[in-house]
Amino acid sequence: MRKHWKDLVVVAAPFIEYLDRDAYFTKPYSGDGSNKLIIQDGKAAFKYASDDSFDDFDEWETVTDSEAVFPESFDWSSWIDHNLHKNRYFGIEAKNFNGADIKLTQGPCLLHELMIRDMRIILNCYSNEYFPDIWKTILDVYLHDGFPCGWDGRYPEGKLVVFSNF
């Protein structure tokens, strides 16, 4: 397990480079489309990301954060939270989202909120040297200019929903 920010930044270099960009979602999602529902409709993405009724699909946070996803021994490091807060989550509020933040907004910016949550979880995965399969996929989606925003169906059946800005 990594215990220092400087070590984490080295091992998590691809994700850190992504977070350090001035702009996100500058082109269409370019990753593997298998087992994914790729959408461009911001309202649909918002629904997948925020609907917790379980009527048509599993609630997104249940798929990604449930006790079944992370082992009991997983260490949620407060020093990661401290460093993210200190660097203002890589300056997320000043980033150019190329309109994706507007497309997914129906109140407070859900895109910012979920990206902050995701960066915290992904960096903890790097620190623990443990990536659940769903989080390997989520990381890959970000690195290919998509926004992972929900699950279509009942997990583990179904597909990861990816918002593509273009």
Image: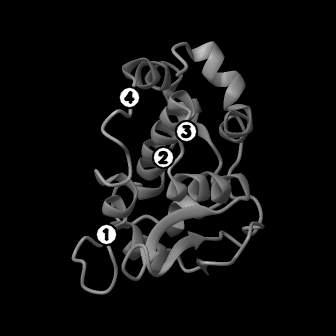
The reply to whether dot 4 and dot 2 touch (C-beta < 8 Å) is no
Residue in front for this viewpoint, 39 or 151 = 151
The reply to whether dot 3 and dot 4 touch (C-beta < 8 Å) is no
Q: Indicate the quadrant where residue 106 lies.
A: bottom left
Residue in front for this viewpoint, 125 or 102 = 125
> Which of pointers 1 and 3 indicates the residue nearer the eye?
1
Q: Which labelled disc corresponds to residue 59? A: 1
- Relative image position of residue 11 (x, y in whole percent): 69, 27
Q: Which labelled disc corresponds to residue 92? A: 3
In space, the residues marked 2 and 1 are separated at their CA atoms by 15 Å
Q: Looking at the image, is 77 positioned above or below residue 74?
A: above
Query: What amino acid type is highlighted by mark number 2?
Result: Asp
Query: What amino acid type is highlighted by mark number 1?
Result: Glu
Query: Which of the two discs, 4 and 2, labels the residue nearer the N terminus?
Result: 4
> Which of pointers 3 and 4 indicates the residue nearer the eye?
4
Query: Which of the two discs, 2 and 3, labels the residue nearer the N terminus?
Result: 3
| Residue receiving disc 2 | 118
Query: Which of the two discs, 4 and 1, labels the residue nearer the N terminus?
Result: 1
How packed mark 1 is, by other alpha carbons closer than 10 Å (few <14, some 14-19, many 20 or more), is many
- Relative image position of residue 71 (x, y in whole percent): 36, 42
For the C terminus, the image quarter is: bottom right
